[in-house]
Image (cartoon, rainbow, N blue to C red):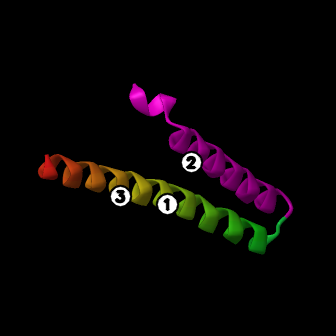
Amino acid sequence: MEKLKSRKFWLCVAAFLASVGTSIAGLHSNNDVVVGIGLICTILSSGTYAFCEAWVDGKAVDNNKED
């Protein structure tokens, strides 16, 4: 439930939805470049969020080991 209060999470959701919207717009206009950009941005937004969460979790574990 705490994830729903995370700004990083909501930023990732917004980026994901915007990227999906871009892909849909590209499909509607038959523009393969726009579809590709939307797909790449969808993957990058999810990957960036996962990386940032892993980084934060790793730092928390390191800080707990020092205590």
Question: Residue 29 sits in which quadrant?
Answer: bottom right
Q: Secondary structure at mark 2?
A: helix
Residue type indicated by callout 3: Trp
- Look at mark 1 in the image and give the residue it sits on: 48
The location of residue 54, given as percent across then percent down, is 34, 55
Do the CB atoms of the residues marked 3 and 2 lie less than 8 Å apart? no
Q: Farthest residue to the bottom: give it.
A: 33
Question: Residue 19 sits in which quadrant?
Answer: bottom right
Label 3 Cα crowd, 10 Å radius (few <14 / some 14-19 / many 20+): few
Residue type indicated by callout 1: Thr
- Give the main secondary structure of the magenta stretch: helix
- The residue sitting at 82% across, 69% down in the picture is 31
Q: Is residue 26 above or below residue 10?
A: below
Q: Is residue 7 highlighted in magenta?
A: yes
Label 2 Cα crowd, 10 Å radius (few <14 / some 14-19 / many 20+): many
Most foreground residue, 47 or 20 = 47
Give the label on residue 16, or none. none
1 with respect to 58 (left or right): right
The location of residue 67, given as percent across then percent down, is 13, 46
- Look at mark 3 in the image and give the residue it sits on: 55
Query: Which residues lie in the magenta part?
Result: 1-29
Q: Earlier in the sequence, mark 3 or mark 2?
A: 2
Do the CB atoms of the residues marked 1 and 2 lie less than 8 Å apart? yes
Q: Secondary structure at mark 1?
A: helix
Label 1 Cα crowd, 10 Å radius (few <14 / some 14-19 / many 20+): few
- The residue sitting at 68% across, 71% down in the picture is 36
Residue type indicated by callout 2: Cys
- Look at mark 2 in the image and give the residue it sits on: 12
How many labels sit on residues?
3
Q: Farthest residue to the right: give it.
A: 29
How far apart marks 1 and 2 lie (CA) works out to 8 Å
The location of residue 28, given as percent across then percent down, is 82, 56
